[in-house]
Image (cartoon, rainbow, N blue to C red):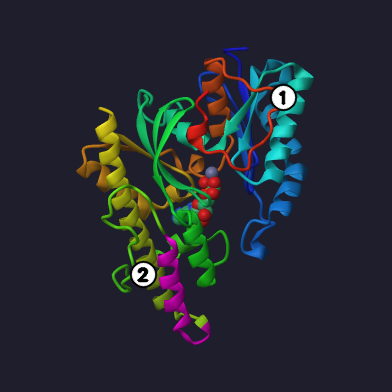
Amino acid sequence: MLGKPVLGIETSCDETAAAVLAADGAVLAEAVLSQQEHAAFGGVVPEIAARAHLAHLPGLVARVMQQAGLGFADLGGIAATSGPGLIGGLIVGAGFAKGAAMAHGLPFVAVNHLEAHALTARLPGVVPGGLAFPYLLLLVSGGHCQCVSVEGVGRHVRLGGTIDDAVGEAFDKVAKLMGLGWPGGPALERLAAQGDAARFALPRPLFGRPGCDFSFSGLKTAVAQLVAAYPAGALPGQDAADLAASFQRAVAVTLADRAGRAMEMFAARHGARTLVVAGGVAANQAIRAALTAAATTRDFSFAAPPLRLCGDNAVMVAWTGIERLRLGLTDPLDHAPRPRWPMDELAA
Ligand code: KG4
Ligand code: ZN
């Protein structure tokens, strides 16, 4: 089965995605459908997400297979996100993959979503010449915020993480407080571009503390109190832009400080010096700039996947499938999806 293309499927949250990659990692076809059904609720509704995955996934898989010009008999395996995430969506995606694997006699790979984000930087072309293990990963998304020493396939050591909200969750909650709609991260970044980041003094939680844990709930509360001080909680245009910019600055400065600690911890464990950022929040330019500067100061090189591969996608799932298949790592068809599945439990 080695040397053949792999189909990847992602359904752990609100993106329905499918992709086909050649065995060397070249992307033959990819599709991501960001479910719009949740906007009216201001957050992902798990039951709606599961039903939408069920409605859209078969058509999406047919589309990428057709674009790649392949039939199932041409594949070397099928990889699907099997955790962590919303259980309904995981059951849809992994169930579909296992059904197709059984029908066509193909190996199945149960992919850990966090490992998929972690291995994206090893896709050919992301880092010239390819990225070797080990490297330091800062994973910043709507559901996760953690620093991980990525030491091999299935070999990940968590150095620190958030003690309350994930950073994307903080962006989404603050955007909601400010009436910017959902998901909030991109809208907040656009508004911040018009604002003065020095206007509001906001807390920088855990700044300068030992270790590389994160905390965002105090920052969110500080924004909530500022917003509540305006009549009906409605900020005039320039104040809103200044608050968005000040919030984004506080997050960027905090992430750079925490990542700086993580780089020191990582450098003490390994000779290697590469920082990789991944996850939806890695699309934020102010955050990328702050992390680039923090890496440069510590003599680390900095790598970030292209924007379309920062958020949830199936290219990263197919690629993780390829990395695992190369090592002979497959999963049985009775593998049960796991809503909680820490990365450091992946070691065989
Ligand atoms: O990785 P992802 O697509 O899904 C999860 O696994 O969570 O990340 C989505 C998160 C959302 O919280 C979204 O608001 C945030 O990433 N996000 C951003 C930006 N683009 C997406 N946050 C800040 N700035 C952005 N440009
Ligand atoms: Zn994700």
Number of callouts: 2
Which numbered disc covers residue 155? Answer: none
Q: Are there few (<14), some (14-19), or many (20+) residues within 10 Å of tag 1?
A: some
- From the image, tell me which residue sits under label 2: 195
Q: Position of residue 292 (x, y in %)?
A: 29, 45
Q: Mark 2: which secondary structure? A: loop
- From the image, tell me which residue sits under label 1: 333
Would residue 176 be seen by someone viewing this image from the given angle?
Answer: yes
Between 117 and 185, the residue placed more toward the observer is: 117
Q: Are there few (<14), some (14-19), or many (20+) residues within 10 Å of tag 2?
A: some
Would you place residue 2 above or below residue 344 in this image?
above
Q: Alpha carbon of mark 1 to alpha carbon of mark 2: how far?
A: 52 Å
Quadrant housing residue 318: top right
Query: Would residue 285 be counted in the magenta stretch?
Result: no
Query: Would residue 227 be counted in the magenta stretch?
Result: yes
Between 11 and 342, the residue placed more toward the observer is: 342
Q: Is residue 45 left or right of residue 121?
A: right
Q: Position of residue 100 (x, y in %)?
A: 75, 25
Q: Mark 1: which secondary structure? A: loop
Q: Position of residue 201 (x, y in %)?
A: 31, 72
Looking at the rendered structure, the kind of residue marked 1 is Leu
Discs 1, 2 touching: Cβ within 8 Å: no
Ligand 2 within 8 Å of disc 1? The answer is no
Q: Is residue 246 left or right of residue 329?
A: left
Q: Provide the residue span drawn in magenta.
A: 216-232
Quadrant for the N terminus, please. Answer: top right
Looking at the rendered structure, the kind of residue marked 2 is Gly
